[in-house]
Amino acid sequence: MRFTIFQDSRKGSRKINQDRIAYIYGRDTLMMVLADGMGGHAGGEIAAQIAVRLFAERFQQDAQPVLRNPLEFLHDTMRRAHTALGSYARQFSLVETPRTTCVAVVVQSGYAYWAHAGDSRLYLFRQGQLYSQTRDHSKVQYLLDRGLISDDDAAYHPERNRIYSCLGGAVEPVIDLSRRTTLQTNDILLLCSDGFWTVMPAREIANILTSAPLLQAAPKMMREAQQRGGPDGDNLSTIIMRWDTDAATDPSAATETATLAAGEFQTELENAVTVADRTGASRELTDDEIEQAINEIQATIQKFRR
């Protein structure tokens, strides 16, 4: 495989970054995953951390050398993450179950497969145009589908944060799966949290990403998105991958996986753990508390990875 990839996560104007992102690839398969812990729910960052790490560990466990059924893997891992969050809340007597949205994509054999729950998004851009995107599980998407508001209204609608599907909620999540989608040279897959897409319209993203090489355009776009968020700006995260990059177009940036041994993986996974206390109040953690939180999260993941 050959691709160029960029990821970044910023807390914006919030005290804590509840987003978590990761990408992992082997010789013949690549996975990207993004989770946005839900503000207002105790430990949203814990929920996002559990979801992303569970995806990462199950991917390395199952992709030997590729996933047999990528869509089944995506759906099953999201359901396991949902169950794991309920288990975590019961084990540690949390007042409320940690919750998160999630979007993930697998690329192998020249095809992309994706799944999502909530309003974290995936876009597929082709030849400078939006080719496909996920549909938010939200009140605003419901209104859009019925023609009651416009696309421009959606980003600023007062109920834009009301979603009806997430991992860790009181009911089983709605998990939407894509079709198997053939990728073409220079197609761009972009995963993002709502702190990014609410301030960066898809048509503008497409223009920016075609104006310069990915590793130049993407950081500038993130800085612009953070600036637009202003003093009330949300956490914002994105993972952007340009597929089968033409070596003549961006020779220094492309990742080649042919040299990886079978069963070997390269991982870019955010390791920071900053959590709210168990009453839901945000505060700084001591080193001992951070270590305990990491151990608790890892113990939960181990129970649900197989």
Image (cartoon, rainbow, N blue to C red):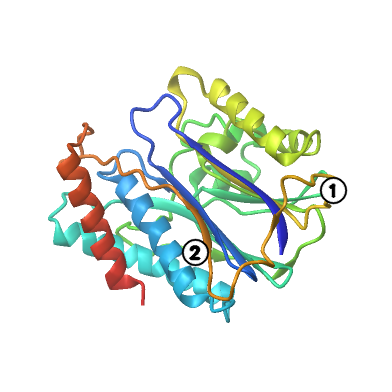
Q: What residue type is labelled 1?
A: Gln
Q: Residue at x 47, y 25 (%)?
A: 233
Extreme left residue here?
A: 93
Residue 278 appears in the figure: no
**Residue 204 percent coordinates (x, y):** 73, 33
Q: Residue 175 carries which label?
A: 2
Residue 253 appears in the figure: yes
Near mark 1 (Cα within 10 A), the count class, few <14, some 14-19 or many ≥20, is few
Asked whether, in this view, residue 72 is left or right of residue 45, the answer is: right
**Residue 13 percent coordinates (x, y):** 42, 24
Extreme right residue here?
A: 248
In which quadrant of the rendered view does residue 149 lie?
top right
Q: Residue at x 39, y 63 (%)?
A: 54
**Residue 20 percent coordinates (x, y):** 43, 47
Extreme top residue here?
A: 231
Asked whether, in this view, residue 153 is left or right of residue 298, the answer is: right
Q: Nearer the viewer, mark 1 or mark 2?
A: 1
Q: Which badge, 1 or 2, is on the more N-terminal residue? A: 1
Q: What element carries label 1?
A: loop
Residue named by callout 1: 127
Which residue is more in the foreground, 238 or 3? 3
Q: Which mark is residue 155?
A: none
